[in-house]
Image (cartoon, rainbow, N blue to C red):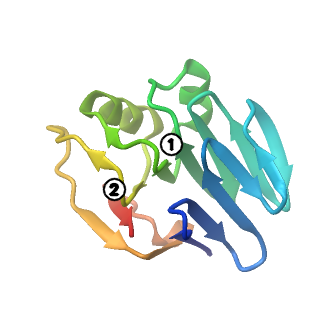
Amino acid sequence: MIQLKASKTGDYELTDKKVVVTLADHQVKIGEEVFSETGEYEVSGVEVIFGATAALVVWEQLHLLYLFGEAAPSTFEKTQFSSCDVMLIDKHVATLKKDLFEETMDAYDPRALVIANSTTIEATSKESLQIQDAPVIKLAEQLLPTEGRDFYRLV
């Protein structure tokens, strides 16, 4: 099981008690290794596929998408990152505009969406969002919804 919480600086911090992965500032940090360039990487059993606007972290059978860009997903990202389990929106994405929100939800089809405390989502006609505030989120295959989506704000 992976635990997700906000660090003191408001970044995403994931841990399984052995490995710590930090998602911040358009980077994925695993231990002392930092990834911010397009490519595929693997450290301590955690695989990272880095794109132009997002990175996919594959860990403990979960596909965690870290969205840090405000542009539409590229064809590469749509094909490589689709049907992710959890999508995490970077804290620097202050507002997730309706069109981008709908396009990323359609492209990546996450079972759960996590936004930072500082991010707002424009009203959407597609889904009525019932966002749950949580200081810590436990992530595991069996805890994710099989139908519909969960929406969280990490506080």
Residues 112 and 117: in front is 117
Q: Is residue 106 visible?
A: yes
Q: Earlier in the sequence, mark 1 or mark 2?
A: 1
Percent position of residue 39, x then y: 78, 32
State the image quarter where residue 43 is shown.
Answer: bottom right
State the image quarter where residue 104 is shown.
Answer: top left
- Is 4 positioned to the left or the right of 146 in the image? right
Image quarter hosting the C terminus: bottom left
Q: Secondary structure at mark 2?
A: loop
Query: Residue 149's mark?
Result: 2
Q: Which residue is rendered at x = 70% and y = 59% of the image? A: 59
Q: Which residue is rendered at x = 42% and y = 42% of the image? A: 93
Q: Which residue is rendered at x = 54% and y = 21% of the image? A: 74
Percent position of residue 21, x then y: 70, 62
Image quarter hosting the N terminus: bottom right
Percent position of residue 117, x then y: 36, 60
Q: Residue furthest bottom?
A: 17
Residues 27 and 62: in front is 27
Q: Which residue is rendered at x = 40% and y = 60% of the image? A: 146
Q: Residue furthest top?
A: 75
Q: Which residue is mark 1?
A: 83
Q: CA distance from mark 1 to mark 2?
A: 12 Å
State the image quarter where residue 17 is shown.
Answer: bottom right
| Amino acid carrying mark 1 in the image | Ser
